[in-house]
Image (cartoon, rainbow, N blue to C red):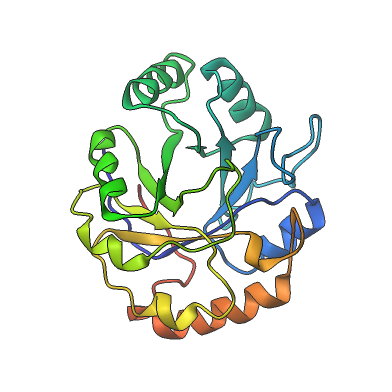
Amino acid sequence: MNTMVSSFLIKVCGLRDCENIRAVAALGIDLTGFVFWPGSPRCVREGSDLPDSDSCQSPRRVGVFVDEKPSVVCHKIRQYRLDFIQMHGHERPEDIERLRYGLDNAGLKDVGIIKALGITSRQDLAAAHDFEGLVSLLLFDTRCQERGGSGQKFDWSVLESYGGDTPFLLSGGIAPDDAQRIGSLRHPRLAGIDLNSRFELAPGLKDVGKLRLFLSQLRLLIPNNQTTKQTSTL
């Protein structure tokens, strides 16, 4: 599995409103996230449309699922033309293997898999090694009771103990005033960040002004300006 990342990825998750999605996409981000878990206030409503994504400059689409059946995941991939699926539940490595098998048999071999893991301590990172070779990316989020996220940070210093080969996205309570801190992170497998609730006007509706300012600050801090929109290979 090719896990090379040629730019620092920016993912904005929990989008739902078409005009808001277009405005966020115009900021030059890499990934847009759409939640398909009914328990989330950001869940994409059944039958909702998403903006066309025919342009080669359009962000790639990530569908977020929680302990979902492979048949449902495959249906949503086709319905919403998803490029990645993010599994945000209690999925075990064998569940990911079964899902990969189902995707391949359904003619969806090009769809990448992201596995989210809840983190509070260095010990939690040990579970990441079980997914080596099975996923395109890991996503390290703050462990909480709710499956939809808490909007709170975990202790980022524990990332130093992650020695796996799979790149990861940093998630969990990243806020508009965190650009400087993120710019100082130097983990060799840090592939990018996932932004959500701290950039919202309301659940599912992002504050484009806050995102624009944050990204402009971050692009001055990341080495070689790697947050500039460019082709990334996973």
Q: Which x, y percent locates residue 124?
A: 31, 47
**Depth check, front residue: 226 or 113:** 113
| Residue 20 in which image quadrant | bottom right
Viewed as shown, does residue 86 lie left or right of 17? Answer: left
Q: Quadrant of the N terminus?
A: top left
Q: Left or right of 47: which side holds 219?
A: left
Return the x and y of residue 68 as percentages of the image width and height.
56, 24
Report x, y in % for residue 140. 40, 52
Residue 129 position, x and y percent, is: 23, 40
Identify the residue at horizontal 59%, vertical 29% (top origin).
77
**Residue 50 higher or lower than 142, as above or below:** above
Classify 64 as above or below 192: above
Q: Quadrant of the rendered structure where residue 135 is?
A: top left
State the residue at coordinates (28%, 39%).
Answer: 127
Q: Residue at x 28, y 52 (%)?
A: 4
Q: Nearer the viewer, residue 216 or 89?
A: 89
Please indicate whether residue 130 sits to the left or right of residue 12 in the image.
left
Residue drawn at (62%, 35%), measured in percent from left and top? 81
Q: How many marks?
A: 0
Q: Is residue 227 above or below residue 163?
A: below
